[in-house]
């Protein structure tokens, strides 16, 4: 079976031009004629002034209309034209009469016939130009529509060939309209319209037919692809219906088996109840006495158990979280520190670095609109770190205003770079701590006890990642993670060989196969030592930040786009 890509090449362009095939074809033909030395100054000016081939056709049509209007009031011209056409029509009969004394009459008759033929040639040339200029005007919109519908390489070549012939014909017609009367008389003898225009008009017709055939083939290929696609979808629907019908039958059989078991259990319970009643009669007890004893026993058992499903208050949760020994900076203080520096840079008091408008990247748009758990890596040089940090702060601020759960790991404000680096284990502990602080992750005392035990017993990065994943799954909402990788050691953790970015990417892939919580991670990379760890399939979305020499304020535009993407 022929692959679908073979058919697609007949109606889809590999690299569609922003200006369109028709526009590019006209520019190609225009450049070809501009380099030609056979055009007059008027014709070159006409070609250079036109931006579309329709402009050339309109100018030629107006020139022809002016020529006809100028000569329409000449009655002698009309009489000469009618007389010449009549005489030429009966020319074969007059040729017979000329055979009488041909040595004298043929010279006179030949001269007159040549004159009459010249007049007829002029009239027929005018009619031919008017007719074909009108046909060109009708043909151009169809060509433009077909080039838009089927922007293929074959269509581009066909349109270029057709436009070259049409432009050549229009320039010839324009030159004829601007000729003098003497040139018209002379060219009626030397350039009959059959010899000058017929070959060119036939080429225009052939190229037009070729273009229509390409459109027909493209339409048939598109229909075939549509047929295959819809047939496959129809097969899938039929398969789903068959599976659904089989499921329904299995459910009905299951219900029938359950009803049968209930009937059997009902009979067994009836027999047991009869035995109990007979025993009660033998012991002298009543059913009321038996129920009172059961209630007493149940109350004794319940009082001996502790209810661990009571709701946990925010005060209790904050007191428990305060017992965790954290060696890193409070995330809120770190965020406020970076937000302060961003405001100072926006006011012109700090160092500003201009970059490309990476926040307008299509990859960022696809990442923010994706319905799956995924990661985007924003990478740049060390000199662009200020803009990337401002971007991370803008994302956190936009998500906070939209009340979307967000956790982050930004560079510590008051520490040196060497002192602020953490291992993958520390970062996972840092992020897990922030998730535990979110409302809804821990609801009962039982959950708090389990998480507390895990928090104190987890040692390796993978164990912390497992705890992080368990807490996130219970969130049942969308969660954003913003991490400045300058805070993480790029080397592989020596405890269990876990790399932070790779492990986080693996966890996001697992979460994509589940329903409920969706996690999206934004990684900021400007340390050269991290680049080798983020290459090769770690993330589908990667955006490069490049510094520019031009200094300009970008903060407002970046914040506006971030708010649009992430809220």
Image: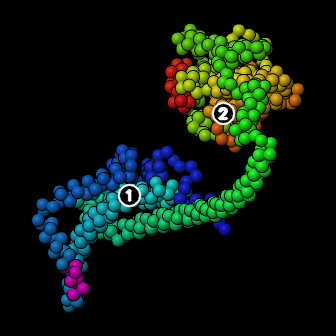
Disc 1 on helix, strand or loop?
helix
* 48 relative position to 285: left or right: left
Give the color scheme: rainbow, by chain, secondary structure or one colour: rainbow
Tell me the quarter of the picture where residue 437 sits. top right
Q: Which mark is residue 519?
A: 2
Query: Measured from the top left, where is residue 343 in percent x and y?
Result: 55, 13
* Residue situated in front as seen by the camera: 117 or 281: 281
Q: Where does the magenta region start and end?
A: 87-93
Q: Is residue 92 magenta?
A: yes
Q: Residue at x 45, y 65 (%)?
A: 212
Which quadrant of the figure contains the N terminus? bottom right
Q: Residue at x 36, y 66 (%)?
A: 197
The image quarter containing residue 118 is bottom left
Task: Calculate the distance from the C-alpha at mark 1 to the C-alpha at mark 2.
Answer: 53 Å
Question: Which percent across, then down, holds residue 551?
Answer: 55, 19
Residue 532: percent from left, percent from top:
78, 31
Query: Which of the pair 445/479 is nearer the observer?
Result: 445
**Residue at the image position 51 percent from the left and 21 percent from the top:** 556
């Amino acid at each position: 079976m022929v692959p679908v890509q073979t058919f697609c090449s007949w109606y889809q362009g590999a690299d569609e031009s922003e200006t369109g095939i028709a526009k590019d074809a006209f520019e190609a033909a225009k450049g070809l004629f501009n380099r030609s030395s056979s055009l007059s100054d008027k014709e070159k000016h006409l070609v250079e002034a036109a931006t579309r081939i329709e402009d050339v056709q309109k100018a030629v049509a107006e020139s022809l209309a002016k020529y006809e209007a100028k000569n329409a009031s000449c009655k002698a011209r009309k009489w000469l034209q009618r007389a010449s056409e009549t005489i030429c029509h009966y020319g074969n009969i007059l040729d017979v009469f000329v055979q009488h004394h041909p040595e004298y009459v043929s010279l006179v008759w030949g001269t007159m016939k040549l004159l009459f033929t010249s007049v007829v040639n002029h009239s027929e040339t005018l009619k031919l130009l008017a007719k074909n200029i009108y046909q060109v005007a009708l043909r151009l919109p169809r060509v433009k529509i077909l080039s838009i519908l089927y922007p293929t390489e074959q269509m581009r070549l066909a349109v270029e060939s057709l436009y070259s012939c049409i432009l050549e014909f229009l320039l010839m017609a324009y030159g004829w309209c601007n000729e003098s009367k003497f040139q018209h008389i002379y060219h009626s003898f030397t350039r009959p319209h059959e010899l000058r225009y017929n070959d060119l008009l036939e080429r225009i017709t052939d190229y037009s037919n070729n273009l229509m055939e390409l459109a027909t083939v493209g339409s048939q290929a598109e229909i075939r692809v549509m047929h295959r696609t819809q047939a496959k979808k129809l097969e899938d629907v039929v398969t789903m219906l068959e599976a659904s019908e089989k499921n329904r039958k299995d459910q009905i059989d299951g219900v029938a088996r359950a009803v049968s078991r209930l009937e059997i259990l009902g009979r067994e319970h009836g027999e047991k109840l009869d035995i109990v009643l007979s025993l009660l009669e033998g012991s002298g007890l009543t059913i009321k006495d038996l129920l009172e004893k059961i209630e007493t026993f149940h109350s004794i058992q319940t009082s001996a158990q502790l209810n661990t499903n009571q709701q946990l208050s925010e005060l209790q949760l904050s007191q428990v979280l305060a017992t965790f020994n954290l060696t890193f900076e409070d995330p809120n203080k770190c965020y406020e520190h970076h937000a302060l520096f961003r405001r100072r840079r926006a006011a012109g008091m700090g160092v500003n670095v201009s970059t490309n408008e990476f926040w307008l990247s299509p990859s960022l748009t696809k990442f923010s609109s994706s319905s799956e758990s995924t990661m985007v890596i924003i990478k740049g040089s060390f000199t662009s770190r200020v803009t990337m940090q401002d971007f991370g702060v803008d994302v956190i601020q936009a998500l906070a205003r939209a009340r979307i759960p967000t956790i982050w790991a930004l560079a510590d404000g008051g520490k040196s770079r060497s002192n602020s680096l953490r291992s993958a284990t520390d970062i996972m502990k840092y992020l897990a701590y922030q998730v535990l602080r979110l409302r809804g992750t821990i609801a009962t005392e039982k959950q708090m006890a389990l998480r507390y035990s895990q928090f104190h017993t987890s040692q390796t990065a993978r164990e912390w990642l497992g705890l992080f994943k368990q807490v996130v799954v219970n969130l049942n909402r969308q969660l954003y993670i913003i991490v400045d990788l300058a805070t993480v050691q790029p080397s592989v953790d020596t405890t269990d060989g876990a790399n932070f970015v790779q492990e986080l990417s693996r966890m996001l892939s697992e979460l994509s196969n589940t329903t409920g919580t969706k996690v999206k991670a934004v990684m900021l990379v400007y340390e050269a030592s991290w680049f080798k760890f983020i290459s090769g399939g770690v993330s589908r979305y990667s955006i490069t930040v490049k510094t520019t020499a031009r200094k300009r304020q970008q903060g407002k535009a970046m914040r506006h786009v971030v708010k649009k993407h992430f809220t």
